[in-house]
Amino acid sequence: MDERDYTSLYQRAVAGPAPQQTLTQSEAWLGRAQRVIPGCAQTFSKSFRQYVRGVSPVFLERGKGCRVWDVDGNEYIDYVQGLLPNILGYAHDEVNAAVTAQIARGHSFSLPHPVEVQLAERLQRFVPCAEMVRFGKNGSDATAGAVRAARAFTGRERIACCGYHGWQDWYIGSTTRHRGVPGAVRALTHPFPYNNLPALEKLLTQHNGEFAAVILEPVNFAMPAPDYLQEVKALARCNGALLIFDEICTGFHLGLGGAQKRFGVTPDLACLGKAMGNGFPISAILGRADVMQIFDDIFVSFTFGGEVSAMAAAMKVLDVLEQTDALARMEASGRCLQDGFNALAKLAGLHPRFECVGFPAWSLLKFRDATGQDSFLERSLWQQEVVKRGLLQLVTHNLTAAHDTTAIEETLRAYAATFKTLAGWLADPNPARFLEGPMIEPVFRVRG
Ligand SMILES: Cc1ncc(COP(=O)(O)O)c(C=O)c1O
């Protein structure tokens, strides 16, 4: 699509709120959940509070490819994809067949299974830092394991971190959701800002010789400044700390070798998760052999660490990613969406207030108020209108190989109508009056 296509799409779009869909079953399930499940979800990002209540589904019933159906039978193109894992889309036939075949032969064994070795060998081939590999189930298993390994290897306790790294004490204690984490643990984790070398340097010298590791997402939605990752590595090295790349999100969405391959910087350790198993739970710690050997000594050991149905899924995911054009298609669809979002925002006079940034296969939607500050009102109005037009979306485009041209075109039509609607609403002195439910709530409070 080019500028002319976007202009004609925008011209044809009709402004005004989309009709509400039936959500009676979702609301009924929410009522039941409220009595038995605190928060009504197992992950904050799946909570009904992340969507505009009353216009958004709360419970999904099934998914296929890039689409899901809620418990009322409404269909959506899903840009959340289980919070990123479904890189090939829901219910991928080949992945499911590989898992079914494994399940038929057993999957929680009493001794290791050869697929553990096969998967480790395979990751070793294309992830630059992967001399050895250990597996887990959640991303948090991988980041907590890597941090413990770094502490044991260096004999130090402090950790410098940048980005989100999961729910375990060592990390979550450094956020505003730290209730329940001992102060002594919280004091050992020090967040630092991305793309700001002096800040990291200052932090490391403040506690000279005490840092076990510098852990960061090598990239998410802002590109690293030239040489930034190389310089972070040099700083860590110079301070005797290990460098850990948290590639839970970048792993596979940015290519098989992750961000470390793309940016040519090899960390001491890296963490993978999310997309590895196309939704089956599997994560990994990968890294330098001399550091990884420490796992023989430290306690990172749990019942389902060697569960192999998810490893069978991961082997099939790797087959598909290696042997087909899946990643290239994700990139092409993602680029079309990103360009389309930005072009339509411009046509509505709402760019850069509404902006799509980041990588095509994993991009971020920015919603800002008139002063340029991130805004939950703008985000809520956007989500309200796109969900009624059949798009399930948080603040990212989590592309899968199943997002085909039809889905992308449908999405851009919904975007055009939403932008045209919001252009009018945001010119109103009180745009909040167009909200049809409570505003979305942040997961983490802003530090005051
Ligand atoms: C960069 C990053 N690291 C770690 C995690 C934790 O992974 P999990 O939720 O699978 O424990 C996440 C989850 O969103 C993540 O985005």
Image (cartoon, rainbow, N blue to C red):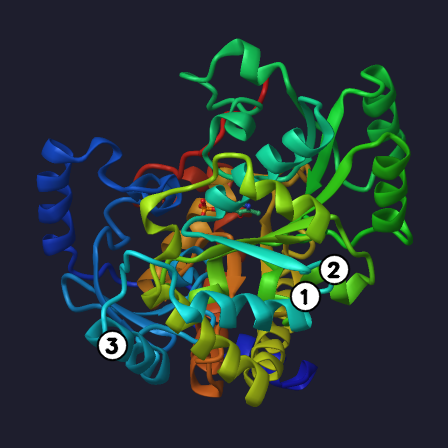
The x and y percentages for residue 337 are 57, 73
Amino acid marked by disc 1: Val
Residue in view at x 40 percent, y 63 percent: 81
Looking at the image, which residue is at 56% across and 89% down? 323
Q: Which residue is mark 2?
A: 260
Please, what is the three-letter code of the amino acid marked with disc 2? Gln
Dot 1 and dot 2 residues touching (CB under 8 Å):
yes
Q: Which of the two discs, 1 and 2, sits closer to the camera?
A: 1
Q: Residue at x 60, y 68 (%)?
A: 123
Query: Helix, strand, or loop for circle 3?
Result: helix
Q: Is residue 277 visible?
A: yes
Circle 1 is placed at which residue position? 127
Q: As displayed, is residue 124 above or below residue 236?
A: below
Binning the other alpha carbons within 10 Å of mark 1 as few (below 14), some (14 to 19) or many (20 upward) gives: many
In primary-sequence order, the first of circles 1 and 2 is 1
Q: Secondary structure at mark 2?
A: helix
Most foreground residue, 21 or 114: 114
Q: Which residue is mark 3?
A: 100
The quarter holding residue 191 reads top right
Alpha carbons under labels 3 and 1: distance apart: 27 Å
Decide if residue 300 is on the left or right side of residue 268: left
Identified by mark 3, the residue type is Thr
**Front position in the image: 57 or 275:** 275
Q: Nearer the observer, disc 2 or disc 3?
A: 3
The circle drawn on residue 6 is none
Indicate the position of residue 165 as horizontal and vertical percent values: 56, 40
